[in-house]
Amino acid sequence: MDWTALFLSLQLGALTVLFLLPLGVIAGRALAYRDFLGKGLAEALVALPLVLPPTVVGYYLLVLFGAASPIGRTWQALYGQPLVFSFEGLLLASLLFNLPFAVLPMQRGFEAIPRELRDAAACCGMSPWRVLRRVELPLAWPGILTASVLTFAHTLGEFGVVLMVGGNIPGETETIAISIYDRVQAFDAASAGKMSALLLFLSVVTIAVTFALSRRIGRKSS
């Protein structure tokens, strides 16, 4: 069992969820409530990682973060190390390729809130921030919870983008998915089977807890 790779994957998943939660709320709410020029294009760009092969996403992120790009050169100048093949670059890539898993469920959650409730809250003198905190977030919580779980689970299982952007550096960018691949390549079926079983167990438990919480929240809301 490669515990280092497992811990790195859990750390990457937790940080991805932590950073994408506020961004998902802002973007999901904007896409749900506002009509603006180019909204269809914005929704398409958010959903793009769902249909592109992971290696294609990884290639463009590698170009975007590479030493020849403005982002890569700026990072190199500030921190003295390349952005690609580092945990920081892997985290940035994770934020981008997980956007649809974070934004789209939240968008659906906000869209499910009747407009009359928000209008009534505003008519009662509640500020926009208080409407968001006291009305919208509690009602959109199932979508927020779903987004968090999907983002975390997808981060744990992602392979192509992680390999393209992060490489395979033990203790730095080698996630559990890449470690399983390495064990298979080395014909170490026992270790690969144990790590795969652990990932399967974590996924089942995470999804089961999510469904249980969603049902409980639904009963409280009704």
Image: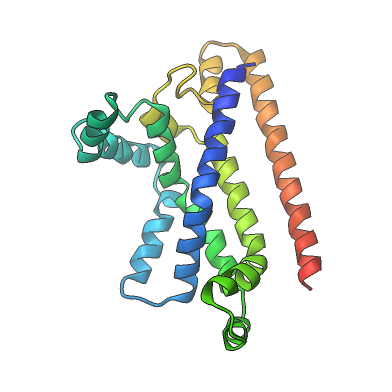
Please name the residue shown 54% across and 77% down the image: 127
Q: Can you say which quadrant of the picture contains the N terminus?
A: top right
Q: How many marks?
A: 0
Q: Along the horizontal axis of the image, is 62 left or right of 106?
A: left
Please name the residue shown 36% across and 70% down the image: 39
Q: Along the horizontal axis of the image, is 209 left or right of 130?
A: right
Residue 211 percent across, percent down from the top left = 74, 53
Of the pair 67 and 179, the residue shown nearer to us? 67
Residue 121 percent across, percent down from the top left = 61, 82
Q: Along the horizontal axis of the image, is 41 left or right of 67?
A: right
Please name the residue shown 60% across and 25% down the image: 6
Of the pair 116 and 77, the residue shown nearer to us? 77
Of the pair 70 and 184, the residue shown nearer to us? 70
Looking at the image, is 87 positioned above or below residue 99? Answer: above
Q: Can you say which quadrant of the picture contains the C terminus?
A: bottom right
Residue 72 percent across, percent down from the top left = 25, 34
Displayed quadrant of residue 118: bottom right
Looking at the image, is 51 positioned above or below residue 58? Answer: below
- How is colour applied across the structure in the image? rainbow
Residue 149 percent across, percent down from the top left = 62, 48
Please name the residue shown 58% across and 54% down the image: 147
Q: Along the horizontal axis of the image, is 67 left or right of 139?
A: left
